[in-house]
Amino acid sequence: MTIKGILFDLYGTLIDIETNESMEEIYRAIAHYLTYQGVYLHRWEVRERYYQIMKQQKEARGEEYPEIDVEAIWNELLMQEGIRSAPIRGQVAKVISHIYRGISCNRLQLYPGVKQVLNELRMSYRLALISDAQSCFAQPEIRAVGLEGYFESTVISSHYGFRKPDSRLFQRTLGNMNLKPAEVIWVGNDMFRDIYGAKLLGIKNIFIDSNQGAKSYKDVAPDYRAQKFADVLKGVAMLRQANATATINPDT
């Protein structure tokens, strides 16, 4: 079967990011901002309530691999603090989420060669994105690094309440593109969430050996290992050829 699509993970694969969510400045800034919304909490209370609601949200998901929704966490805190207007809560929750991310993010940049590889691949393949991420972070960050418009399908885990390696995220993307597992190649940097996840559906895969992500998981092995992002082109070529050969010789 012909390879028609290349699916990518985002953080640790395309985007090199570093965050520190333990910084006191995050919760101090949010506490100060909340004052202007009529909510009076100390920074330690903001932090404690955030993680408490996060835990409750995860437990309520009932998923093996639950994903949180940061905006929903802040929305819940605001409701608990007496802000009854849903539109106002939604607006304030989004601002708080951006404050949280903006302060905690120390580095946000593409890995070397990403755009060159994507530009070459999109001449021959349909590209898509599957990310364990928060939509309120990922969408503006995709724009910030210049990747907006590259992907015909973008599936972000915060919309669904579960994360990779749950195969439903891959299935959602395949459904969006009307493609079969044998018609795509997956590219990711985490041996458990990305490579194991792809293998659950029989999707050919390329492991990016970046500065992030789990390097091993049990006896899972990728179909191709890329030492740098430019190697993805070699991996795609190799897997495409192997796929074509298997189609021609299905019994071998």
Image (tube, rainbow, N blue to C red):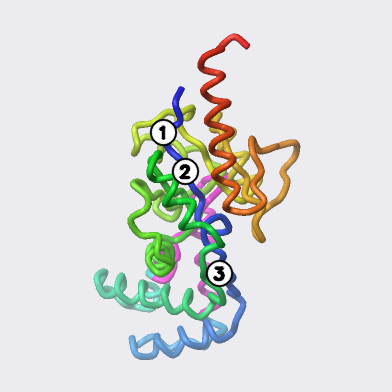
Per the picture, the main secondary structure of the magenta-coloured stretch is: helix
Residue at 71% x, 50% y: name it.
Answer: 215
Q: Which residue is mark 1?
A: 4
Q: Are marks 3 and 2 in contact (CB under 8 Å)?
A: no
Q: CA distance from mark 1 to mark 3?
A: 42 Å
Q: Which residue is mark 2?
A: 7
Q: Which residues are magenta?
A: 46-74
72 in the magenta segment: yes
Q: Are marks 2 and 1 in contact (CB under 8 Å)?
A: no
The image quarter containing residue 107 is bottom right
- The residue nearer to you, when weighing 164 against 238, is 238
In the rendered image, residue 248, in percent from the top left (x then y), is placed at 52, 14
Q: CA distance from mark 3 to mark 2?
A: 32 Å
- The residue nearer to you, when weighing 200 against 145, is 145
In the rendered image, residue 183, in percent from the top left (x then y), is placed at 45, 29
Looking at the image, residue 252 sits to the left or right of residue 66; the answer is right
Please tell me the numbered disc located at residue 252: none
In the rendered image, residue 60, in percent from the top left (x then y), is placed at 49, 53
Question: Is 122 above or below relative to 210?
Answer: above
Which label lies toward us, 3 or 2?
Answer: 2
Query: SS at mark 2?
Result: strand
Q: Give amino acid for label 2.
A: Leu
Residue sticking out furthest to the top:
251
Question: Is 8 above or below relative to 50?
Answer: above
